[in-house]
Image (cartoon, helix red, strand yellow):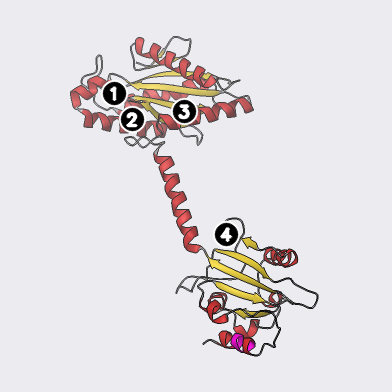
Amino acid sequence: MTQTLAMSCEAERSAPPGAPPVWAPWVLAQLQVGIIVLDGADRVVFVNDWFLQRSGYQASDMLQRRLVDVCEATPNFFKRLSLAQTTGFPAMLSHSLHSPPLPLYMPHLVGHPPAILSQTVHIVPMGRRTAQGEGYTLIQATDVTPTVRRESLLRTRVDQMHLMARIDPLTGIGNRRAFTESLESEVRAAIRAQGPLGLLMLDIDHFKLYNDHYGHPAGDQCLREVAALLQRVIRRPRDRLARYGGEEFAILLPGTPMEGVLDVGRDVVNQVRQLGLPHAARPHGDVVTVSVGATALYPTQLDDASVLLTQADQALYEAKAGGRDRLCHHRSIASSLA
C-alpha cells in the first residue's frame, strides 16, 4: 500500500461520526487515470499514484495543501474548477478544445525530452459546498494520447486518399477532377481580383498512331515524359497542370493575360518538339509534337469557367485542323511553329 493510500485510509478510519461521506481510496488508487480529490477549502485530500508518477509531484508535497499552490495547471483549468464548484455542475476540458490543462507527462524515454500528455479532464463536484468548507471535488485526468495518435493517423490517411483521388496515377500530375476544382476556385479568385485567367489545352499529335506503332507501354512512357516536361515549363506556384483525359493536358494560368498565355504556349510547343521523342508513325515528321489551344479572359461570373474551356477547346481544334505542331489562340489564326 502506497504512502498516499495509507494516509487516505488513516483519514477514513479517524473520521468522526457524522462526517461527510468518505470515498473508497483503495479503489481510486488502482484506477488507470489521474485522480485528485479536494475538500471544501480546495485542499488536496487524495491523489493517486497514476497522477504522481506522471506529474513528478510527491504525495507529501500535495496532501493538505491548496491545489492552486502546488499544481502548475493552466489558468483555464482553475477557472473551470471554480465555476463547477460554484454551480455544482460537472465540467470537462476535452483534448480537442483545450490545451493540456494539467502538468502530466509521458513516461520518460531515454534520449528524448519529456512530452506532455494529451488529456481530457473531468471536474465533478461531490456534495454542495458550504460556508464551513464542506463538500468535495473530484478531478479525473485521462490520458488520451493513443486516441489523439489514432485520430492524427486517420486524418493523414484521409488526406492521402483525397490527394490520391486528384492525382493521375500514370503521370503523377493532377487529374481532371483536380483541374475542375482548381478551375472553379481560380474563376472565383479572378472575379474577386478582377484579374485575368489563362488556359492552355493541348493534345499529343497522332497519339493513336504512336500507340499502334510502339505499343501501349511505350505510349504510357511517352505520356509520362511529356507530363514531366510540362511540369518544368510551368514554374509559378499557382499554375496548375493536369491530365485532362487520354493524351490531352490542361494548364491553368491564374493572373495571366493573353500575351502571357501565348508565351507559355509557344514554349510548350517548342520544348516538346525539342524533347525529341521518336514518332516514326507520325505523318510529316519523326518526333512527338503537340497541338495547343490558348485563351484568356477576365471572369465576371462562375459560368465563365465553361466559357474558358469552350474557347480553349475551339482554339485546340483550330491547331489540329491547321496541321498540328502549333499554337492557336481563341478567335485567331494559328501562330505556326512548325
Of mark 2 and mark 4, the one earlier in the sequence is: 4
Question: Which kind of residue does numbered mark 1 sit on?
Answer: Val
Main SS, magenta residues: helix
Can you give x and y, in whole percent of width and height, for residue 306 in the image?
Answer: 50, 19
Q: What is the secondary structure assignment of the residue under circle 3?
A: helix
Residue corresponding to mark 3: 180
Q: Is residue 95 visible?
A: yes
SS at mark 4 in the image: loop
Drawn side of residue 159 relative to residue 283, left or right: right
When the figure is inspected, residue 320 is found, relative to residue 145, above or below; the finding is above
Quarter of the image where the C terminus is located:
top left
User: Between marks 1 and 2, how big is the CA–CA gap?
Assistant: 9 Å
Is the residue under label 1 in contact with that under label 3 (CB below 8 Å)?
no
The crowding category of the residue bearing disc 2, from other C-alpha atoms within 10 Å (few below 14, some 14 to 19, many at least 20), is many
User: x and y percent of residue 321 in the render?
Assistant: 35, 10
Question: Disc 3 marks which amino acid?
Answer: Thr
- At label 4, counting other C-alpha atoms closer than 10 Å, the crowd grade (few under 14, some 14-19, many 20 or more) is many
| Label ID, residue 288 | 1
Left or right: 292 in relation to 94: left
Of the numbered discs 1 and 4, the one sitting upstream in the chain is 4
Which portion, as a residue range, is magenta? 7-11
Of 95 and 160, nearer the camera is 95
Q: The disc labelled 4 sits on which kind of residue?
A: His
Judging by the rendered image, the residue that carries numbered circle 2 is 226
Is disc 3 surrounded by few (<14), some (14 to 19) or many (20+) residues within 10 Å?
some
Select label 3 or label 4 by which is in front. Answer: 4
**Mark 1 or 4, which is nearer the eye?**
4
Q: Are marks 1 and 2 in contact (CB under 8 Å)?
A: yes
